[in-house]
Amino acid sequence: MSANDAIFLSAHEAPGAQSIQRCDACAHELTALDAAPECPKCGGLLAIIHRAPVDVMGAPLVGSALAQCLSPATPGVHVSGVWRFESLIMPGAGEAITSHPEGNTPLMARTRVNAFAGCDGLLLKHEGYNPTGSFKDRGMTVGTTQAVRTGATAVACASTGNTSAALASYAAQAGIPGLVFVPAGKVALGKMAQTLAYGATTLLVRGDFDACLKLVQEASRELGIYLLNSINPWRVEGQKTIVFEMLQQLEWNAPDFIVLPAGNLGNTAAFGKALREAQALGLITRVPRIVSVQAAGAAPFAHGFRNGFATRQAVQAETIATAIRIGDPASWDRAVRAIRETDGLVITVTDDEIIDAKVVIDASGVGCEPASAASVAGVRQLVQSGVIKASDRVVAVLTGHVLKDPGILVELHQERADFAAANRPVEIEPTVQAVADILRRSRAN
């Protein structure tokens, strides 16, 4: 096994260190407290390798004994659904931890959604219940904690919206200036409002997300700003906890499939790493298949999957699902590994399929942003094609809150005459009879 295949540090590696950073491409190693955004030797992405957890006697902590130590009942900062997994994401973070807290998101069943998808065993892991309304808080709490540990004087990211909101919030809590690079005219108003409210400096870049990412990477190298995009390896560590927490909620009985929206592929990569570690530690006995769902208009990873990842071709991304409107994903190679190791799939859904799923999710009382609905649309497609059986245990990840993209709600329910599921406000006279007429009509429907 090569160094890059290692899951945990071996006994002779990095004596005295709980974690190191290792380049995916050349295996060059950095200390855990090095603030480099990428490998200084080759420019490759860095990954975090931890020492496997041990008990107070120094014996390996695995299986049910480890599961007990990760219990949500642990007091203090570990009330966070991220930081109770401290030993698996950033051992020894201590007083540097910057937490709201986050995590502890629900795993829910909704009969209407299950019927739509055709899967009785479907559960929804709703990351929109995080403090700023998306899964990004999980990675940002760990990334910001690393910024504090390294003495960063500023943090920055490029964002389609959710990342910028999370960075702005956590930077404000940590007392560190935040910069967000956003594609001009491409971000939902609700997401911009959060970023502005939390106090980060917002830069509207004349270009798409990929232009923003290139610029923020150059700025971080030349200006010494700590980069907090999904290529940051510590953010990947935080996003692993979606899987750890989900498995914990399922009493460590892994589902058959985990289905998630895929844009920049940070979650696909993080999920693969989490499952790899969970199996190595004896927390699970089998690994679920990861299904990454891309919007048809922003599907470079799906195109790569179809040719066995023999080629990689960026696309000009366009989709109603702004959170996954990304044409050249940064975490490609890590995501490829995750798909291969889990016998996973990469599929596409159209914007119409996304909206159809969103309508059902919203009407069930759950609600989500458009990108989140791609996961349920993907489950439905795989049930119809026979890949997922109605009896399979499936977790679909909803990545963001329904209020993340209020513009699409207004458009669908008030402005589009062709939208059959529109729930338009009704103007009435101020009489009880008028209310009764509306109530009778509602009951009839």
Image: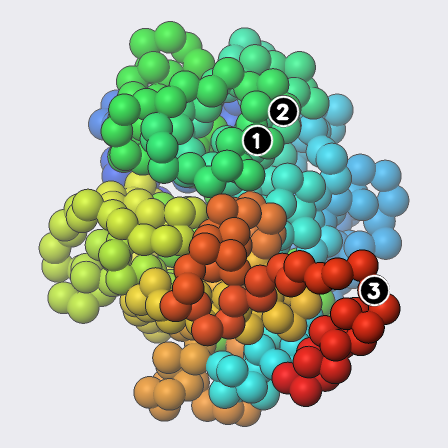
Secondary-structure class at tag 1: helix
- What residue is drawn where x is 42% and y is 47%? 323
Q: Is residue 92 left or right of residue 160?
A: right
Check contact, mark 2 vs mark 1: CB within 8 A: yes
Q: Is residue 382 left or right of residue 121?
A: left
Q: Position of residue 152 (x, y in %)?
A: 54, 13
- What residue is drawn where x is 66% and y is 59%? 427
Secondary-structure class at tag 3: loop
Q: Is residue 280 above or below residue 210?
A: below
First along the sequence among labels 3 and 2: 2
* Observer able to see residue 283: no
Kindly indicate the quadrant of the structure image that contains residue 19. Answer: top right
Q: Is residue 125 above or below residue 132?
A: below
First along the sequence among labels 3 and 1: 1
Q: CA distance from mark 3 to mark 1?
A: 38 Å
Q: Amino acid at mark 2?
A: Ala
Q: Which is more toward the observer, 369 or 97?
A: 369
- What residue is drawn where x is 70% and y is 29%? 97
Residue behind mark 3: 431
Indicate which disc residue 193 carries: 1
Residue behind mark 2: 197
Q: Position of residue 186 (x, y in %)?
A: 36, 37
